[in-house]
Amino acid sequence: MRILALIAALAVAMPAHAADKMTLLLEWYVNPDHGPIIVAQELGYFADEGLEVEIVAPADPSAPPKLVAAGKADLAISYQPQVHLQVHEGMPLKRVGTLVASPLNCLMVRDEGPVKTIADLKGRKVGYSVAGVEEAVLKAMLAKNGMSMDDVEMVNVNWSLAPAVMSGQVDAVIGAYRNVELNQMAIEGVKGRCFFVEEEGAPSYDELIYVAHADTMDKDKITRFLSATERAMQYIVNHPQKSFEIYSGTAKELQDELNKRAWFDTISRFALRPAALDAGRYERFEAFLLEYGLINEKRPVADFAIDVTAK
């Protein structure tokens, strides 16, 4: 009994093993796309993996991958199309996991407007926020329907995608998120409709991914991080309403109708196996970027994507 009492006393006296710290940079302010991360944090799944994760929303959405490349953070959320371009530019980044495993991007129009098919865009205005990949995606969609960029007028709407369509400033926008802008329009009483990029000529891709420094990443910590988010994803699938309450309970601004609608529209898009890598998907998108002139040569998938759990 004395031995047991001594062991118990020592256990109380000894400090708990310190958790490994990680910094995760978001690509935008907190929103339903980040569901598995927020749920993993709130339910203690990161702590269960021996991690203390600091989640940081960026002041500049373009900065997170650059900060990871500079060794200022462990992970950043980025986009599959962007990691291809960034690696070709010489940034030491690799995809190490997937957050949203299908495109969210779509070509959005008013449901009651004049554009019933993509061919109806001929001679009309298309709004956009970022040139480059979005322009290549639109080129592919137009080409599938017998048109080119010369058949439309491009208008920079500066991230004001849904308002530009609702006001009639443009006839369509490329880059709208099907889980956000469609709901934003619906809440305003305007029904929208999406042409899905993966159905209209562009290859499918992972919308949101985790990127780490190619040379200095800590695979063990990243593996534990992905394990926690996988567990959170399973919880979200099994308990969609409760998981929304957990997510929205972290900040008052998340408790509105847009967040609620977007949450339930996003669940089916999350990666059920965040560590898993579909090398063929990355190879096909690399070929797509080459075809549309955004890169000068194809590079092997291993240059920009990795399965950190592979032995």
Image: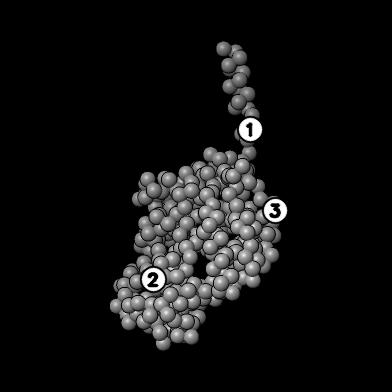
107 displayed left or right of 298: left
Q: Position of residue 54 (x, y in %)?
A: 58, 51
| Three-letter code, disc 2 | Phe
- Residue placed most toward the observer, 310 or 38: 310
Residue under numbered circle 1 = 15
Q: Position of residue 302 (x, y in %)?
A: 63, 55
Q: Position of residue 213 (x, y in %)?
A: 66, 55
| Three-letter code, disc 1 | Pro
**Mark 1 to mark 2 CA distance (whole Å):** 56 Å
237 displayed left or right of 3: left
Residue under numbered circle 2 = 195
Whether residue 27 is visible, yes or no, is no
Please tell me which residue is depicted at 50% across the width and 42% down the height of the picture: 45
Residue under numbered circle 3 = 215
**Mark 3 to mark 2 CA distance (whole Å):** 39 Å
Label 3: state its secondary structure. Answer: loop
